[in-house]
Amino acid sequence: MSGSGVTSGGPGGTGGDAADRRARLVVTAFYLVQGMCFAGLLAQVPTLQHDLGISDGTLTLILLLVPVVAGVGSVLAGALAPRVGSARLLHVCGPLVALAVLGAGLAPTVAILYPVVAAVGLLLGLVDASMNMQGVEVEQRYGRSLLNSFHGAWSVGGILGSLAAVLAHSLGWSLAAGLGLVAAVGVAVDVVAAAASGGGVPRATEREAVPGLVLAEQPAAVAPRADAGASRAARPPWGPLILVGLAVTIVYVADSATSNWSTKYIQDALGAAANVAPLGLAAYLGCQLLGRLAADRQVNRFGPVVPVAVGGIVGAAGLAAVTLAPGPWVAVVGFGLTGLGLSVVVPLSFSVAGRLDPEGTGIAVARVNLFNYVGFVVGAGLIGGVAELLSMRLAFAVPALLALGVVALAPAFRVAARDDVASPAATR
């Protein structure tokens, strides 16, 4: 990412020129492909388990391996981005994610599957971090909130990845063919996006916008430093990032609970038919997408604190409805409210990271991204443990209570406010 020399592309920071619009479109494409690859693989997990004869215990270890190794990838991205640039990382690793997903479908044994899944996780972490670095950069060039729309593209990709699995099953395709469809589309879109941006190879001596790039970048390794002490002082502070990261962790605990357990809960605990039970997850993802598509306008109008606080309340109410649901349809509505309410938190956390990293190193983005995987791992274990000890219904009360923590942490997102939209008064 470029440093403080980046300027917004249009009058008043509207990002109106062709280069900024192209950058926004290219970064959106990478978000969409990342969501498609991730969901496309998860949707084929039952088939993968059946084809390789994987036990439930082994499958749990394999699934937990992905976020753990992805955390390593995020740390690695934070170390590499200041040296080689997040655009270059994204262009190299984006297509590799799609190929690694295909590799999971081609793995002939569990022994080979483990390193393939580790590669998937590492690349997912690298791309998650680098694409959010690029998203922050585009947002800063436009001078207004955009990250919710980028994460909305991720949600669209997730829906497309799931539909690809449905199509593969309907046509009787093998696991490799189904994942091959996702990989082929993913590689094609990523390659076209990289070509449209000119390959993303920055000129290290320039901080201004370079025609043909996703974004202008200057690797921090070539930037002049007065001394080691100044370099340390320029590093983003951990304190505010931890507060925002805690909110991200809470959101991913809820996300993990919904992704892993909503269908089972609606079918087993609430007695829904097999064709009704998946609607909980569908409602969650659909409303998450709607929330993200609408959120940027609200953030630009009211600033970040109000949407995060209101989102935390709505998310907690949705999970409470799931916990207390007398029947499946109330739970479906509850999952929808959960997705709608909590949808704004993660995108805004990266806006905070961008504001806390004026040098544009990408380190803050990589740090925030770590909390994504922490929440996923904690959520999987916590919800499963409570369900085993008490009940599935009470298990959803845990993220419902935790979601109230998002409301308490909302003031930490004030850092993400644009100078002219820090409060509602600024819009009047």
Image (cartoon, rainbow, N blue to C red):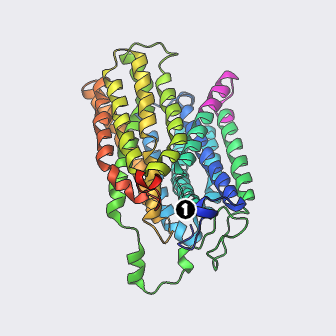
Does residue 377 show up?
no
Does residue 182 show up?
yes
Q: Residue 204, image x and y in percent?
A: 63, 77
The secondary element bearing badge 1 is classed as helix
From the viewer's perspective, is 170 left or right of 419?
right
Question: Over which residues does the magenta segment extend?
Answer: 162-177
In the rendered view of the protein, which quadrant contains the N terminus? Answer: bottom right
Up the image or down, 306 lies above or below 396; here it is below
Q: Residue 283, image x and y in percent?
A: 49, 27
Q: Nearer the viewer, residue 23 or 253?
A: 23
Kindly indicate the quadrant of the structure image that contains residue 337. Answer: top left
Magenta stretch holds residue 170? yes
Magenta stretch prevailing secondary structure: helix
From the viewer's perspective, is 399 left or right of 280?
left
- The residue sitting at 56% across, 54% down in the picture is 127
Up the image or down, 377 lies above or below 231; here it is above
For mark 1, does the 10 Å Cα neighbourhood hold few (<14), some (14 to 19), or many (20 or more) residues? many
Magenta stretch holds residue 254? no
Q: Amino acid at mark 1?
A: Gln
Q: Which residue is mark 1?
A: 140
Q: Residue 362, image x and y in percent?
A: 50, 64
Kindly indicate the quadrant of the structure image that contains residue 59. Answer: top left
Q: Nearer the viewer, residue 171 or 17?
A: 17
Q: Residue 256, image x and y in percent?
A: 41, 37
Q: Nearer the viewer, residue 134 or 100?
A: 134
